[in-house]
Image (cartoon, grey):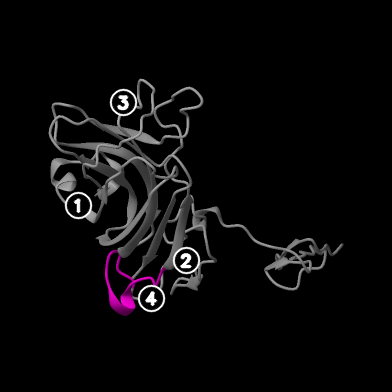
């Protein structure tokens, strides 16, 4: 009688997987080797995450699930106090009004935005320029700006330049408005004027050439998102006079301090 034996071999395989980047001997489940190695998470970039302003480094948190996030504990969008993301940065826009907005030929290509008060008017208001910007959270915006001026007794849009020597006084003003969400300046938004600033101008024969300079500032509270700031100019003059004013023909500046 032949005895037959059946041998069964049970094999148990235990696998432990580790991933190494820059190394063939990873020491953890994910091991990124190298003294200058970095990790990029595109969901946390300034393009994809409003909590990353793209100017300064953002603080990264780990939530209860172990996920990396820019959202701090107890954060509420648009909130205030400890629950709001602290921000404080500067948006600097040098020479924010193009020197030749109206596209005039040389030598009249440094007059900025021209606003005319003609012989039939004693006051006129016109749009100068707008700048778009983004804030990552509800915040206060402090606006400081300086605008250069060119003043002529003839229509600079024709183009032409003429001295004013009638000894009569003109007033020139600037102000700005905010277009919330940059979706078009509504009548309600236009009605709220910030940073109103005016100057008197009077000239007689013997005056000097150059750009008068006018600066101003204002504050506003804005929600998170992309907005735009719109600048306007006003010109007032005596009856039966012509006054042409160019706003921004030389070096201007715009600084927006964003904080909460």
User: Answer yes or no: do the residues labelled 1 and 2 have beta carbons within 8 Å?
Assistant: no
Q: Nearer the viewer, mark 1 or mark 3?
A: 3
Residue placed furthest toward the top: 158
Circle 3 crowding by C-alpha within 10 Å: few under 14, some 14–19, many from 20: many
Residue that carries the numbered disc 1 in the rendered image? 193
Q: Nearer the viewer, mark 1 or mark 2?
A: 1
- In terms of depth relative to the viewer, which is nearer, 194 or 24? 194
Q: Which quadrant: the C terminus? A: bottom left
User: Answer yes or no: do the residues labelled 2 and 3 have beta carbons within 8 Å?
Assistant: no
Residue that carries the numbered disc 3 in the rendered image? 155
Distance in Å between CA atoms under marks 4 and 3: 60 Å
Residue 89 locus on image (x, y percent): 45, 65
Distance in Å between CA atoms under marks 2 and 3: 57 Å
Residue 82 magenta-drawn? yes
Distance in Å between CA atoms under marks 1 and 2: 38 Å
Q: Is residue 219 left or right of residue 206?
A: left
Circle 1 crowding by C-alpha within 10 Å: few under 14, some 14–19, many from 20: some
Circle 4 crowding by C-alpha within 10 Å: few under 14, some 14–19, many from 20: few
Circle 2 crowding by C-alpha within 10 Å: few under 14, some 14–19, many from 20: some
Distance in Å between CA atoms under marks 4 and 1: 37 Å
Mark 2 lies on a secondary structure that is strand
Residue that carries the numbered disc 2 in the rendered image? 69
Q: Is residue 121 left or right of residue 172?
A: left
Residue that carries the numbered disc 4 in the rendered image? 73
Residue 122 locus on image (x, y percent): 14, 35
Provide the residue span drawn in magenta: 75-87
Distance in Å between CA atoms under marks 1 and 3: 27 Å
């Amino acid at each position: 009688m032949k005895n037959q034996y059946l041998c069964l071999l049970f094999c148990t395989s235990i696998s432990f997987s580790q991933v190494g980047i820059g190394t063939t001997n990873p020491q953890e489940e994910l091991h990124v080797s190298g003294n200058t190695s970095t990790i990029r998470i595109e969901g946390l970039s300034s393009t994809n995450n409003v909590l990353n302003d793209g100017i300064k480094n953002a603080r990264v948190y780990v939530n209860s699930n172990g996920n990396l996030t820019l959202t701090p504990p107890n954060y509420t969008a648009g909130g205030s106090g400890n629950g709001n993301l602290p921000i404080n940065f500067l948006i600097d826009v040098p020479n924010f009004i193009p020197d030749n907005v109206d596209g005039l030929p040389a030598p009249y290509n440094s007059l900025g935005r021209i606003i005319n008060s003609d012989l039939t008017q004693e006051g006129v208001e016109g749009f100068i320029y707008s700048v778009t910007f983004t804030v990552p959270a509800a915040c206060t915006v402090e606006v400081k700006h300086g605008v250069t001026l060119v003043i002529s007794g003839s229509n600079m849009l024709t183009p032409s330049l003429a001295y004013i020597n009638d000894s009569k006084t003109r007033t020139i003003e600037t102000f700005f408005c905010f277009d919330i969400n940059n979706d078009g300046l509504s009548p309600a938004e236009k009605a709220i004027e910030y940073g109103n600033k005016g100057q008197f101008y009077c000239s007689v024969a013997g005056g000097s050439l150059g750009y008068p300079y006018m600066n101003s500032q204002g504050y506003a509270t804005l929600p998170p998102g992309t907005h735009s700031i719109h600048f306007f100019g006003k010109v007032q003059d005596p009856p039966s006079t012509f006054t042409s004013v160019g706003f921004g023909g030389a070096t201007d500046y715009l600084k927006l301090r964003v904080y909460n």
